[in-house]
Amino acid sequence: MATRHKTAVDEQPQSDSSPVDSVVQGAIESAAPDAIDRAAPQSRLQLLLSRVFTRADGRAPVWLEAIVVIWLLWLYDQINNLAPLRRIVALHNAAAVLALERSLNISPELGLDRWVAAHATLGLILSYYYVSAHFFVTFGLLAYLWWRKSRDYRPLRTQLVIINLIGLAIFWLFPVAPPRMLASDGFRDIIVLTQAVGDFHQGGLASTADQYAAMPSLHIAWATWCCVVVWRVFSSRIARAVAVAYPFVTAFVVIGTGNHFLLDVLAGALVTATAVGIEVAAARWIPAYRRRRYGLSRSRLRARARRAPVAQ
């Protein structure tokens, strides 16, 4: 009888896994469909957002870019509306910037301004350059990026937006009048002197421009951003040489026309470097954040669900 009992026990099927392994496997299999159910609404939402905020060809939709531009213009206008209340502070800050430069023996503004004022034709050329070049070059490159370099457009556009946000924040916190407003120190307003078309230093156009936004120089910030763009998307030595020269020519123009101090120029270049650094750091951080946020990728969840047994 003992032998018969032993044989019956031996004939019982043996499990390949321990009871603990069976429990863990069951928990994983039961959790997989739930994970898919939770991921599905998220996936649908992300798909909807991608369709709304991205064109079929991968470019950003024009309406979204227009909203960003309008928002930045609105912020600029809000700061410009404070101009009558900040005139005295802006003139005081301008005098302080000039005094700091003179203490460091780096104040070329007055000599360059007087030299340009003595050459009418040169002054007129520099005035038109100051009024128009930064708009045509900057937005021309933006349009080229959007049309031909959609992969590069988003990060470079984001850098430009950050540049403007940093500039607007400094305009609000630290208004600085341009050198041309320090007439008691001998400065001349070259744009007014040459009567260039599009003069926004006097008349009806004066109210549309922030007269106390010398620090930092957005002309220089935009020019150095254009240099970054050309260096990134073009391999031609000539194009890169022109791109490198562009910020230096712009610096000569903004100082020679009495619109910026040398420290404004340096601050503008620093703003661009800061904006590029912020965008690059964010590009590296966001993918890691997403991995930490979702844990397993959706593809792994789908694969696990496929391995789960189908209920009969």
Image (cartoon, helix red, strand yellow):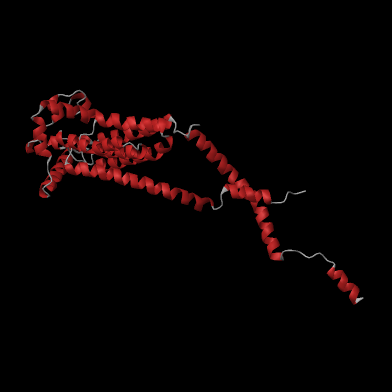
**Above-or-below relation of 125 to 161:** above
- The number of callouts visible is 0
The quarter of the displayed image where residue 2 is located? bottom right
Q: Is residue 194 left or right of residue 152?
A: left
Q: Is residue 152 left or right of residue 165?
A: right
Q: What residue sits 50% from the left and 51% below the top?
A: 291
Q: Position of residue 268 (x, y in %)?
A: 25, 42
On-image quarter of the N terminus: bottom right
Residue 206 visible: no
Q: What residue sits 17% from the left and 27% below the top?
A: 125
Between 168 and 230, the one lying in front of the other is 230
Between 167 and 262, the one lying in front of the other is 262
Q: Position of residue 38 (x, y in %)?
A: 60, 47
Q: Residue furthest front?
A: 237
The quarter of the displayed image where residue 61 is located? top left
**Above-or-below relation of 86 to 132:** below
Between 243 and 74, the one lying in front of the other is 243
Residue 142 visible: yes
Between 16 and 31, the one lying in front of the other is 16
Q: Position of residue 153 (x, y in %)?
A: 40, 36
Q: Residue furthest bottom?
A: 2
Q: What residue sits 78% from the left and 65% below the top?
A: 14
Q: Position of residue 121 (x, y in %)?
A: 13, 25
